[in-house]
Amino acid sequence: MYKTISRWTLILLICCSTLFAFGQTAEDDGPYHLSLKRELLFGGAGALSIGVGTYVQNQLDSPLRRELKITSYDQISGFDRLGSNFELGNSRKLSDYALYAGATLPVLFFTDRTMWKDVLPIGLLYAETMAIAGGLTNITKAGFARPRPYVYGPEWTPETPLKSGDQAAFVSGHTSLSAAGSFFFARVFSDYHPDSKLKPFVWGLAATVPAVTGYLRVRAGRHYPSDVIVGYALGATVGYLVPTLHKKKTLPKGMRINAGVAGVQLDYWF
């Protein structure tokens, strides 16, 4: 599921970057500063990480169940055994819906007239965010190749070969992408509306949606608690940092620069 979203974000990244390269830039009064060099760096990092992560994960060998170092669920750490190795109800399906909810929260920006005029730069930052988060998730999954909890269930015999998807527990892609979209949404909203009374609710929503996603992934038998905790931290960090690192440089509060024919004057208002 997360691979599909990563592909779409990569396509969006390419489209937005192409438009930006043809001279489309952010509005002068927007909170972000976009430049070709910076976007090539962020966009390139996202595209490269998705490509490398997907390639490496697809190259994973398919060992038999009996070749695993851990042969039973009881041998897993006590903390991770707080989760479940079987699916509970519709947890898996509900976790997909939670992923979609978190990853697509920025769509709400379309309802804001102030932000609509900056739809291109915001869309580019969003694509960079999701591409980087998705790429880092893929690379981590491939690097650890951790079997999912259901692999230790009674229906899996020692002769059952494992596919790459069965060895993709760490980290949770659903949680990382949900957190990336949610925290990107809260960060950008706060930058455009720094004095809004809705900020506590926006940040509360941003923190809650990926947490619910992670809980559902554990209850679905797809991940251990440590998978979703690290996935949450990864996605939230990327979602927060990408727009933050694009903030325009501002002077300290009360400081102004006045330029004229006689020179430049720096004033500080108390």
Image (cartoon, helix red, strand yellow):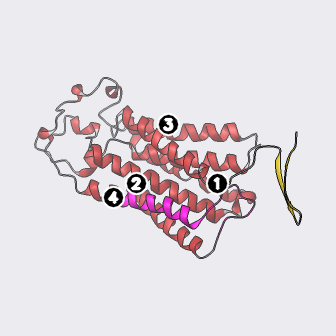
Report the amino acid beneath label 1. Answer: Leu
Residue 227: where, in percent of width, then height? 37, 37
- Can you identify the residue that label 3 sits on? 211
Residue 183: where, in percent of width, then height? 57, 45
Residue nearest the observer in this picture, 90 or 51: 51
Cα separation, mark 1 vs mark 4, equals 32 Å
- Can you identify the residue that label 2 sits on? 135
**Magenta segment, which residues?**
25-51
Q: Is residue 57 above or below residue 80?
A: below
Residue 201: where, in percent of width, then height? 67, 38
Relative placement, left or right, of 143 versus 135 is left
Residue reaching furthest to the bottom = 22
Relative placement, left or right, of 259 versus 170 is right
Label 1 or label 2, whichever comes before in sequence order: 1
- Can you identify the residue that label 1 sits on? 108
Residue reaching furthest to the top = 78
Residue 260 visible: yes
